[in-house]
């Protein structure tokens, strides 16, 4: 595979960026190992704006790590920092390979929430997500943390749901205060297949995909619907993610692709 050599020390007036998407979840990827960029919520919001900026669901920084091969920080489109992002991890992995920063088939990645292992399997990128935490089953939904907090609600005909209304009602519900929760509306479409629509905290809108949300949906489907691993999850972009897990959820993996979109300079 041909690699694109990206300047690691851009001039003050020219800071390179790349844009990647995973299952329709799109990100601006920046190499910040030299601490070129600082946290500026206003700038993050402007860059992510669909009409006034580059346009993205979030911004990913590649950073150094003292405990892993690489580090990662992710910022939502509203400028807030997220604990983790499954699709973002795959996008960062694709960036590392395309830019020739790393040609490893397997590497470790430190996020705010946990350290992950990422493996290339041809065009598919597999992420070891770590064990879910804070699992709670209620009569109307399942709540769990797969790197970030998620609520999973099973419905029929999710394409007819008014996500723009239902999503915020649950995301900001008092039971999830103060941090809020990502909201996943999930439909069983086959013996080992789900369809999903996700309202994402921080983006404050429905996104085309959410990797941690797909992971949460698959685990909830095993708990509530007794669906076996692996589970294929069809995202709103119609792209598929595969979630596999052991019965005790100590080994949870998410697999899918990530695609380079374009590059430029800020």
Image (tube, rainbow, N blue to C red):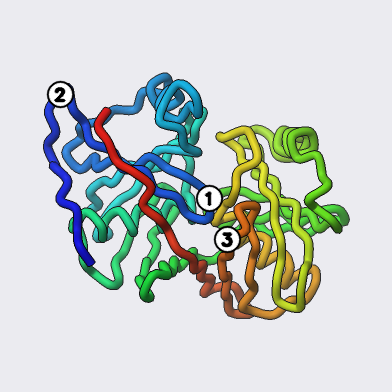
Point out residue 147 in the picture as x, y percentages from the top left corner. 52, 53
Crowd around label 1: few <14 · some 14–19 · many ≥20 (10 Å): many
- The mark lying in front, picked from 2 and 1, is 1
| Residue 221, x across and y down, in percent | 73, 68
Q: Quadrant of residue 146?
A: bottom right
**Pointer 3 residue:** 239
x 33%, y 58%: residue:
94
**Mark 3: secondary structure:** loop
Q: Tell me which residue sits at (26%, 56%) in the image.
A: 96
N-term-proximal mark, 2 vs 1? 2
Check residue 24 in the rendering and tell me which mark sits there, or answer none: 1
The residue drawn where x is 49% and y is 65% is: 256
On the image, numbered disc 2 is attached to which residue? 12
Instruction: Please report whichever mark, 3 or 2, sits nearer to the chain's N-terminal start.
Output: 2
| Marks 3 and 2 close (CB-CB < 8 Å) | no
* Mark 1 and mark 3: Cα distance apart in space: 8 Å
Give the image location of residue 56, x and y in percent: 47, 37
In the image, taking residue 37 as reference, residue 183 lies left or right, namely: right
Question: Do callouts 1 and 3 mark residues in contact (Cβ within 8 Å)?
Answer: yes
* Residue nearer the viewer, 240 or 104: 240
């Amino acid at each position: 595979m041909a690699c694109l050599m990206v300047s690691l020390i851009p001039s003050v007036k020219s800071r390179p960026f790349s844009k990647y998407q995973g299952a329709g979840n799109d990100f601006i990827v920046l190499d910040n190992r030299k601490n070129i960029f600082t946290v500026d919520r206003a700038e993050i919001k402007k860059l992510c704006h669909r009409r006034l900026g580059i346009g993205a669901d979030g911004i990913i920084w590649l950073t150094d790590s003292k405990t892993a091969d690489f580090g990662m920080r992710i910022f939502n489109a509203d400028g807030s920092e997220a604990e983790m992002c499954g699709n973002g991890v795959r996008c960062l992995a694709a960036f590392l390979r395309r830019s020739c920063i790393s040609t490893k088939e397997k590497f470790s990645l430190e996020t705010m929430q946990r350290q992950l292992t990422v493996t290339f399997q041809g065009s598919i990128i597999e992420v070891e997500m770590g064990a879910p935490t804070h699992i709670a089953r209620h009569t109307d939904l399942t709540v769990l943390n797969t790197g970030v907090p998620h609520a999973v609600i099973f419905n029929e005909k999710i394409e007819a749901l008014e996500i723009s209304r239902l999503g915020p009602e649950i995301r900001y519900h008092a039971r999830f205060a103060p941090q809020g929760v990502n909201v996943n509306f999930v439909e069983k479409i086959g013996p080992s297949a789900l369809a999903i629509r996700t309202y994402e905290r921080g983006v404050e809108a429905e996104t085309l995909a959410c990797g941690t949300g797909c992971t949460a949906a698959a685990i909830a489907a095993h708990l509530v619907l007794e669906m076996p691993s692996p589970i294929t999850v069809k995202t709103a972009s119609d792209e598929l993610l595969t979630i596999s897990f052991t019965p005790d959820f100590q080994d949870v993996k998410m697999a899918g692709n990530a695609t380079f979109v374009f590059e430029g300079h800020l």
